Image: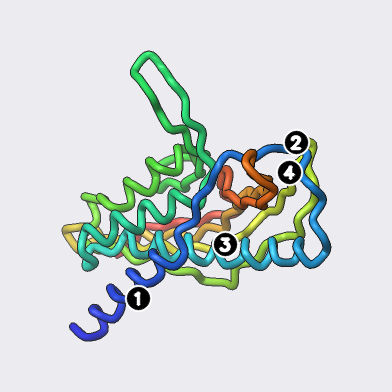
Amino acid sequence: MKNFHLYRVIALCLLIFANVACVAQTRGDIKDPTKEQLQEFKDLADKRTEDLLLYIQQLSDKEIPLNLRKRSLNAALSLFEKTDTTTSEGKKTLYPTIQISSKTGPTRAIPVNEYLENLMDLKHFAKVKVTSYQVNYSTPFKKGPDGRYHSTSYYYQNFVGEYKDKKMVYRSKDRKAINVMVGQSYKNDTFIMSFGNITVEETESSISN
């Protein structure tokens, strides 16, 4: 068991350093990509969706050292579009939102950075397991009114949380949709992919013994 856990930690380190994506500011009215490039966009969207799911799994795993979970957090956030702004409180980075299902009320949306940070510190659960219960897929990219190319990437998340008293277990199954965008850098013609808002398309949850 210890060897298996060590393997997971090593695999996490390799994935983070290999797949961190730097999302820069992009512009609209981009140069039209070829059919081959559009297929490459779709393949990359599928891969990055899988990466995001793995980061979410690692963030919620309390058996993984905290420093590695923080690296997973940074790697996950690097997939998303972000906007730097200045408020009365100083400089602030704004992230897209993600809808989350709730055992007590309707679906609600929160900033994705807040969602991921919360996953690292679920105090009311002694143990959390996040898995994918179906193959992820994305739609073909199409040009939008903003001049960028857009796709929707779907993923299927199964969440199981064991409460600290070990008497009850919370379960939820969500089908979620990510707005995926491809634009071009202001500095050059490089295509840049980023994730936007995430919505819940389908959800079911329960609490049981």
Among the two numbered marks 3 and 2 on one chain, the one whose residue lies closer to the N terminus: 2
Among the two numbered marks 1 and 4 on one chain, the one whose residue lies closer to the N terminus: 1
Q: CB of mark 1 within 8 Å of CB of mark 2?
A: no
Residue at mark 4: 148
- The residues tagged by marks 1 and 4 sit, at their Cα atoms, a distance apart of 34 Å
Task: Report the colour scheme.
Answer: rainbow
Residue at mark 2: 146
Q: Position of residue 125 (x, y in %)?
A: 24, 56
Residue at mark 3: 155
Q: Quadrant of residue 167 in the image?
A: bottom left
Q: Quadrant of the N terminus?
A: bottom left
Give the crowd class for mark 4: few <14, some 14-19, many >=20 residues within 10 Å: many
Residue at mark 1: 11
- Kindly identify the amino acid type of the residue bearing the numbered disc 2: Asp
Among the two numbered marks 1 and 3 on one chain, the one whose residue lies closer to the N terminus: 1
Residue occupying the point 45% across, 56% down: 205
- The residues tagged by marks 3 and 4 sit, at their Cα atoms, a distance apart of 22 Å
Q: CB of mark 2 within 8 Å of CB of mark 4?
A: yes
Give the crowd class for mark 3: few <14, some 14-19, many >=20 residues within 10 Å: many
- Kindly identify the amino acid type of the residue bearing the numbered disc 3: Tyr
Q: Helix, strand, or loop for circle 1? A: helix
Q: Helix, strand, or loop for circle 2? A: loop
